[in-house]
Amino acid sequence: MNPEGLIYRLTGGPDRPETDRWLALVSLLLVGAGLIMVLSSSQALAYLNYRFPLYYFVRQAAFLGLGVLLMAVLRHLDYHVLRRYAPAAAGITALLMLLVLIPGVGLRVNGARRWFNLGPLGSFQPSEVAKITFAIFMARWVDKRRDRLNSFVDGFVPFAILLGAALFLLMLQRDLGTALVMCAIFCSVFFAGGGRPRYVVLLLVLLVTAFALFTVLESYRAQRLAVFLDPFKDPLGAGFQSRQAILALGSGGVTGVGLGHSVQKYLWLPEAHTDFIFAILGEETGLIGTTAVLAAFVFLALRGYRAAMRATDRFGMALAAGITTWIAFQALLNMGTVTDTVPITGVTLPFISYGGTSLAITMAATGVLLNIAAQGVQQRYGWRRGDATADLGRRDGRPRPARARGGASVPR
């Protein structure tokens, strides 16, 4: 199937109302770029570990197939159906996040337990699934408590407790990067659902203080902070990875050294196909390639927030805002890590980094976002209910008044 046919299938046929084809297109372009970069950045490591240069590429392609399937199914599945299963899905995910901590059950890598070993299928990371299940659960939660969100006792305090519980599970797994992304998801859902901005600001102050304490109390996080402040202070020790990433980006120049011609991927840069794939992308495609990827994520964020503003209800608005913030903020964290703009967080670049669970779940979330966008267009133009515009346009759920082309209001 050609790319136009694939986009056509994912975004509806002639009998279905149009959805946001630009959102689908930019998502698929990012996935395609990611598959190319995984192929380029992983061959040396794959040959060293498995004597098969295409090992990581083949696995990523397999999970891409799963991701496309999930994206297509959830694009056509009414997102309101997810609402009824949200509590059960969030509970099962939380249970899996606890089970992964049990020695002998969870896989221990670099001192952290975040994965289940599935044998030939590879590893499975429950915290990746938590991003979408917790986002759906919180969107349902803010929708049910819409009349109490502005209350400190009945709105903010329960929300802070739920966020604290999620962060507690992640900190037990020593996963600060995912904890930061989870904070972004929860805060965006709370704000989009109608929570008071001052409560969000208060929560951010508390979170920054808590993360600062966690950084100081954990030696390896304090070491990462020191590397961030001066990546060249210990170039052959703690600062080696950051230094090599900066060298990769610098050597790429404006146009790059060419696809497949990276030097750093030959075991000079650790995690070249996962957390630091953006550095290889910069080395091989230069400033042009990195700018294109950054612009793609900015465009995706704009289309995602547009879908949130035009959602048919508060649940859809909060869920679309949560998903969009998750993808955009995680991309920002990853690129900031590689460029030494922020301390190393250990998060992958959405759609692009190697990681089957991450890729499949991100594409599934994009399918949900496409469905929210489609239903917003349907109601906006009366394709489903045949009545007034559903462009919410405001966090309180009140629609904007319809206007004629000359700017005057017109009756419905």
Image (cartoon, grey):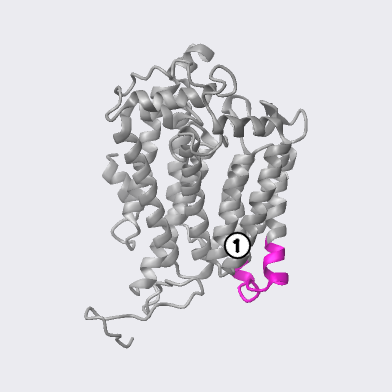
Instruction: Answer above or below: position of 322 versus 178.
Output: below
Residue 81: image x %, image y %? 54, 61
Report the side of 145 relative to 325 (left or right): right
Q: Where's the N terminus, which quadrant?
A: top left
Report the side of 177 relative to 303 (left or right): right
Q: Is residue 96 visible?
A: no
Amino acid type at circle 1 is: Val
Q: Where's the C terminus, which quadrant?
A: bottom left
Q: Residue furthest left?
A: 406
154 part of magenta stretch: yes
Residue 139: image x %, image y %? 58, 62
Instruction: Residue at 51% x, 74% y: name it.
Output: 396
Instruction: Residue at 32% x, 54% y: name it.
Output: 21
Report the side of 2 relative to 98 (left or right): left
Q: Nearer the viewer, residue 408 or 94?
A: 408
Residue 3 quadrant: top left
Instruction: Answer above or below: position of 133 versus 390.
Output: above
Secondary structure type for disc 1:
helix
Q: Which of 351 and 194 is in front in this view?
A: 194
Q: Which residue lies furthest to the bottom in this view?
A: 411
**Disc 1 crowd, CA 10 A, few/some/many (<14, 14-19, 20+):** some
Report the side of 353 relative to 91 (left or right): left
Location of mark 1 (residue):
200
- Specify the segment rendered in magenta: 142-159
Q: Which of 43 and 194 is in front in this view?
A: 194
> What secondary structure do most residues of the magenta stretch adopt?
helix
Q: Can residue 218 be seen in this view?
A: yes
306 part of magenta stretch: no
Residue 250: image x %, image y %? 37, 26
